[in-house]
Image (cartoon, rainbow, N blue to C red):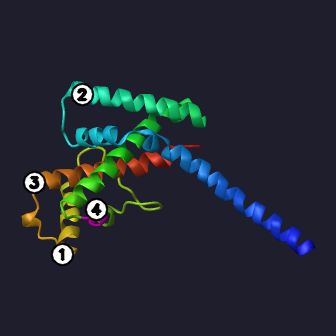
Amino acid sequence: MIRTLMAGAVLALATVPGAALAQEGAKYDCVVTTATPNLKAQIGGAMTGQGDDASREALFKQLGELVDGCVTRHGIGEANKGNYFDYSLARISREWLIGDISKQGLSVAPVDKAMDFGLGKTNPDLSGEMSQDQIMSIVQAYIDSGVNIEKVDQSVWEKVGAYAAATSIYWNKRKTLTF
């Protein structure tokens, strides 16, 4: 009987961190799970140059409304709101670009490897212009993975560059969120 009670207590305590992580995950996921597939596609397209300034401004307004709702729902706090908006924009763009690039037969894994993107990795800041060395590192990673780079359309390379920028912002803004 005592063993059963102790086992129950251990299991109950073991679920507390999991529940806390799930709540934290809900904060990170809120905007992405709230945005419609159409809005995500429009944002992804806008990040690759589709649309005009007015349409992009309208998309940012819609995204801002989703961010506001998530900030309120999860008690995220005003201090995190700007970074949360940037994180959400980068995440939606990044996820859309992964799908769009994969439709062209390319993986984004060479970019992640070349730029050292990921949890606990260096995640260089690519929010400005990428250096020639960074560009060549990505190209070399694709060559090393067996891609004939001469056969990749320029529009796909532009999406690869947009993916690198979005992923950089995604990881760097995520680090700044203090919830």
Q: Quadrant of the N terminus?
A: bottom right
Q: Which mark is residue 146?
A: 1
In the rendered image, which residue does mark 4 sit on?
A: 108
Look at 66% across and 54% down and name the residue there: 19
How far apart are labels 4 and 1 at the CA level? Answer: 13 Å
User: For the residue marked with disc 4, what is the amino acid?
Assistant: Val
Look at 65% across and 58% down and name the residue there: 18
Q: Which mark is residue 55?
A: 2
How far apart are labels 2 and 1 at the CA level? Answer: 38 Å
User: For the residue marked with disc 1, what is the amino acid?
Assistant: Gly
Q: Is residue 14 left or right of residue 131?
A: right
- Is any atom of residue 1 visible in this view? yes
Query: Principal SS element in the magenta part?
Result: helix
Q: Which comes before the other along the chain, label 3 or label 4?
A: 4
User: For the residue marked with disc 2, what is the amino acid?
Assistant: Ser
Q: Are marks 4 and 2 in contact (CB under 8 Å)?
A: no
Q: Quadrant of the C terminus?
A: top right
In the rendered image, which residue does mark 3 sit on?
A: 154
Residue 34: x and y in percent read 45, 39
Q: Which residues are magenta?
A: 107-111
Look at 50% across and 42% down and name the residue there: 30
Residue 147: x and y in percent read 16, 71
Secondary structure beneath label 1 = loop
Q: Nearer the viewer, mark 2 or mark 1?
A: 2
Residue 86: image quadrant is top left
How far apart are labels 4 and 2 at the CA level? Answer: 28 Å
Residue 61: x and y in percent read 36, 26
- Give the number of marks: 4
Which class describes the residues within 10 Å of circle 1: few (<14), some (14-19), or many (20+)? few
